[in-house]
Image (cartoon, rainbow, N blue to C red):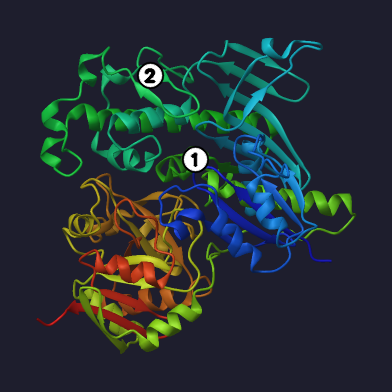
Amino acid sequence: MTYRTLGINPGHNGSAALIVDGKVELYIEEERLSRLKYDGNPFRGILEAIQRGPIDEIVLGGTNPNFDKLPWNGEDAYSALVRKHYPNVRVTNMGNEHHLGHAAGAYYNSGFDTAVAIVVDGAGSYHIMQTQEGQPQDQAPQGFETESIFHCKDLNTITPIYKSYGGNKTPNIRGRNETTEFVFDDATTITKVYEAVSHYLGFGFIEAGKTMGLAPYGRFDERMDDLFIGDRANKNMIIPNYPAGAFIDAGRYEFFKYPEEAKGWHKDASLVQEQFKNIAWTVQDKTQKLVGDLVEKAIDTTGEKNVVLAGGYALNCVANYYLRKRFPDINFYVDPVAHDGGTSIGLAKLAYFNYCKQNEVEPNREALTTLYLGPDRTQEIQYFGSNFTGGQGASEYTNEEVTPADVAKLIADGNIVSIFQSKSEGGPRALGNRSILFDPRVKDGKDFVNKVKGREWFRPFAGTVLKEDAKEWFDLAGMEESPFMMYAVDIESAHVGELPAITHVDNTCRVQTVSEDQNKHYYDLIKAFKDITGVPVLFNTSFNLAGDPLVETMVDAIQTLERSELKYLYLPEVGKLLTKGNKPE
């Protein structure tokens, strides 16, 4: 009997995930459909799932179990929407188990039989822990989940063994109940400090990836060395603000003051101050070491050799590489949808395995082997590939048949080419279905493409390499492949200087490996580029402009070309190249 579960994450990174007998059939983030960055309330994603057939169970996630009820029938809006299509749908509310959703997603996606899951997050669900029998609720320790360790013993046994909680007025309590060591305090924890620094640098709390990109430009600075005291932030430097972000106490320290003349440094490298670069370096260095300490604690406590990572911090590809090098004998799996959106997958799979156990059904366990999980856009591609010519908006387009070699030659000649394939990638990384491609050999390529996309000058770009050539060009720290672009790795010394457009200031590159089985059209294009240049690597960045979500539809793609200097759009599934030109006067 087929069992279909729909996971819903209503918060930022709002998402819907349809799981059919344990396999991810659809994963879509609401921002891709609504075109509003970090959009929540994934109603459009739910509608995408509903179109694919009956839903047996929906699982409500997020960080709060108290969903607003519609006054006339007592339902929440998500359940009502699904129920109107499938009246007998079962509703499971898991809004109070945010970190469990992260851990379940990483564990189930990994394919490991057993594992220890580490979740490092900003602020998850709000928990109240009764530490004594009969203790009044208002006297029990309570706070938001910040770091968790779960022992994943089998498909139905994911047990918390360590939980850290933070709150603005939470008393400092450390203890243990029957299964779990716990810490409650009002200090600012790992991800919250990263959010505080990101806010101080002008990126906003949730744009930690920009801070990570700036970090290698900095250096050790003794003025900031006590950003953390032990495993908690120095409260003289950091002001907690749970659940939303935290703040640098810039008024207390002269070196944190933000000079008026430096306000434009995001766009002008000459205006950047040393303290900006150094605080980014410090928070990266300090936090990745603290996450390493959590990994050590998890291994020592459980004896596991399989470690899975999730939560927003697991998107830190620099830290992920640091962990692989610090623990060379550990089998790591980093959830490629580690942010809050990925909890919809974790909770939907958890519901499926619970159903199988309760009904004595043999479960189907499949590791996540692809992220091409978005809606099928084949009809759109066929239409645009056949009919899209002539004037559109301010531009005129030509439509011609091309081979991978033709497009590779175009890139090798110094042109930016965007690529669009049917199913969009899940998670934040572009993996060749919604990508902008360029020649990695171009000396000033990073500056050129950053300008075209409207991004900050210091942000690096990724590279996609043929799987069979990856180890020659990149130090993968023992990995055979990196298909989901979750690591920033060292470029092998023999090739340092050959890929300047994707080489960061510290000689690293966020890398994706690709095989013919994983993405044939993308593989063929890179292979053709190698045949022309001898380099089996393409510069790869997400198909969007600064501040926009990745494009989802063909209309999004054309609108992005219209709003930018991008000129070429490659549709490999139909062998077509759309070229934008100026309309004749």
Q: Marks 2 and 1, how far apart in space?
A: 20 Å
Q: Residue furthest front?
A: 72
Left or right of 261 in this view: 181: right
Q: Residue at x 73, y 65 (%)?
A: 54
Viewer-closest of 287 and 350:
350
Q: Residue at x 27, y 75 (%)?
A: 568
Residue 183 sits above or below residue 361 on the image: above
Q: Residue at x 27, y 12 (%)?
A: 252
Residue count near mark 1 (Cα–Cα under 10 Å), binned few <14, some 14–19, many ≥20: many
Coordinates of residue 558 in the picture (x, y in percent): 32, 71
- Quarter of image, res 74: top right
Q: Earlier in the sequence, mark 2 or mark 1?
A: 2
Q: Which mark is residue 240?
A: none
Q: Which three-letter amino acid code belongs to the residue tagged 2?
A: Ile
Judged from the image, the secondary structure of the residue bearing numbered disc 2 is: strand
Q: Can residue 112 be seen in the rendering of this structure? A: no
Left or right of 343 in this view: 356: right
Q: Mark 1 highlights which residue?
A: 312
Q: Mark 2 highlights which residue?
A: 238
Coordinates of residue 417 in the picture (x, y in percent): 28, 72
